[in-house]
Amino acid sequence: MTEKFQLRIFTEPQQGASYDDLLRVAKHAEDTGYDAFFRSDHYLKMGPVTGEPGPTDAWVTLGGLARETSRLRLGTLMTAGTFRLPGPLAISVAQVDQMSGGRVEFGLGSGWYEEEHTAYGIPFPSLKERFDRYAEQLEIITGLWETPDGETYSFDGEHYQLTNSPALPKPAQRPRPPVLIGGAGKKRTPALAARFADEFNLPFVDVETAAAQFERVDAACQAIGRDSGEIVRSAAMVLCVGKNEGELAQRAESIGREVAELRDNGLAGTPDEVVDTIGSWRERTGITRLYLQVLDLADLDHLDVVADQVAPQL
């Protein structure tokens, strides 16, 4: 793509995708020049789809892709903090980072989709408790990775306690993989981003909402004496691009959406329209990275249109 602005593929496999489907998209994304392949971390479909053949685990998937790709950055938007204990999660992510030769980026969120927890027997605490656990998880996982070789790590929190952990294995990237934090929470989210984030992501919001949240992150950084310029700004948008109106309408229909709605709420239109939209976002928010939510994983030509007719104009 370009060094100054990165386009990344973002998939939602809980809507109905096997590992082979994801592998095909990831390899095509790598071959056509995209910067990264990311996926959601969900165990239950959303909306009027069957979800068949059923969910795939995010970090099992990324471990497989780590061995079957060579250049793509790999990660999640976002790993659900409710799904995994922080110590074992640190081990899993470090292992995938090793397996990929240091290509992992670690997105972590508090978890939000109650129905998937109910469906698979996963505890779903109150929002306050989820955020309290989330803050401890960020501290533990980064603390384990950043512990110097040969030293141990201990943590005594309200929800998690670790005693004399060897803090192994270490990720390939030292001291740790980049950490992604995101979301529209106005107080705790910016504060956690200021402490832990290498990238802050705003998914599926309008440009004014995004700009205001980035400003909150900047203010939280200033409050603790951190340079906010150290944090990459990014957004995620649903993708629907067509070389003409007919192709655009066909792609919108394939994902059960209306063209007008996608133009209002996503990254949709002809290649030139999409370039203009990205330009407006860059000017208003300062984003340097965009995650393209691809919902029809069988339509690899969709990726080609963006690679051939959008990316060169950025």
Image (cartoon, rainbow, N blue to C red):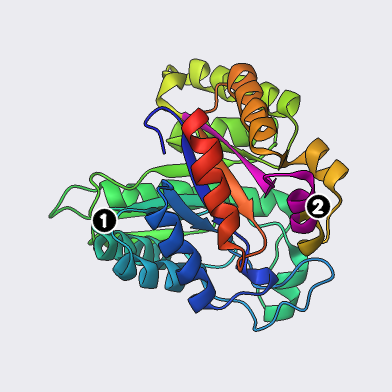
**Front-most of 206 and 143?**
206
Q: Residues within 10 Å of mark 2 (few under 14, many from 20)?
A: some
Of the image marks 2 and 1, the number of the one nearer the N terminus: 1
Q: Which residues are magenta?
A: 232-251
Amino acid type indicated by mark 1? Pro
Which residue is tagged 2? 249
Which residue is tagged 1? 171
Residue 262, given in percent of the width and then of the height, sits at 80, 44
The image quadrant where one finds the N terminus is: top left
Q: Residue at x 65, y 54 (%)?
A: 130
Tell whether position 29 is magenta. Answer: no
Q: Where 292 sits versus 283, above or below?
A: below
Callout 1 secondary element:
loop
**Front-most of 274 and 137?**
274
Residue 150 placement: quadrant: bottom left
Residue 35, given in percent of the width and then of the height, sits at 41, 46
Residue 231, given in percent of the width and then of the height, sits at 45, 28
